[in-house]
Image: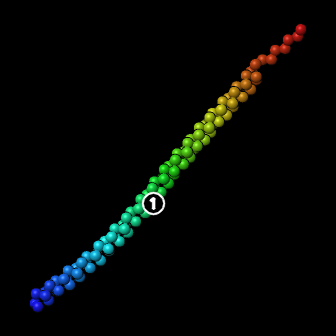
């Protein structure tokens, strides 16, 4: 009878331990699922951030190019304006300094 009681006790303990193990296993599985879900979300956010960063860098590059083009155009325009002033001044001064000759035929 003592052996039967000890055997039942051992079976009860084993059954209890198995139940606890199954509960822990289910909890672990749930935790793994949650962790995988969080990792997937973070990977998604990282991809979005990477795309946005690339887009912003591309737009920034385009903006810099436009600014450089505008600066270049402005510089060229200023140089052309300066040259035009010189040419106008040269023409005006050369007209003043030339003696006018009148020929009668």
Percent position of residue 91, x then y: 73, 25
Q: Which residue is drawn at 34% across and 68% down?
A: 32
Residue 49 vs 15, above or below: the answer is above
Q: Residue at x 38, y 69 (%)?
A: 34
Q: In this view, does 88 lie to the left or right of 2?
A: right
Q: In this view, does 101 lie to the left or right of 75?
A: right
Percent position of residue 37, x then y: 40, 65
Relative to the observer, which residue lies in front, 50 or 28?
28
Residue 72 vs 1, above or below: the answer is above
Outermost residue to the top: 105
Relative to the observer, which residue lies in front, 16 or 105?
16
Percent position of residue 93, x then y: 72, 25
Relative to the observer, which residue lies in front, 96 or 3?
3
Relative to the observer, which residue lies in front, 95 or 34?
34
Quarter of the rendering containing residue 20: bottom left
User: Pointer 1: what residue?
Assistant: 45
Q: Does dot 1 land on a helix, a strand or a loop?
A: helix
Q: Is residue 76 left or right of residue 103?
A: left
Q: Which residue is drawn at 37% across and 68% down?
A: 33
Q: In which quarter of the image is the C terminus?
A: top right
Q: How is the image coloured?
A: rainbow
Percent position of residue 96, x then y: 76, 23
Quarter of the rendering containing residue 69: top right
The reply to whether residue 51 is visible in this rendering is yes
Quarter of the rendering containing residue 14: bottom left
Q: In which quarter of the image is the N terminus?
A: bottom left
């Amino acid at each position: 009878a003592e052996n039967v009681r000890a055997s039942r006790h051992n079976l009860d303990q084993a059954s209890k331990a198995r139940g606890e193990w199954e509960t822990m296993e289910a909890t672990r599985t749930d935790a793994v699922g949650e962790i995988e879900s969080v990792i997937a979300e973070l990977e998604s956010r990282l991809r979005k951030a990477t795309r946005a960063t690339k887009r912003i860098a591309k737009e920034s590059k385009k903006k810099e190019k436009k600014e450089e083009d505008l600066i270049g155009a402005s510089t060229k325009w200023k140089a052309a304006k300066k040259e035009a002033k010189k040419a106008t001044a040269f023409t005006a001064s050369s007209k003043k300094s030339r003696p006018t000759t009148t020929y009668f035929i």
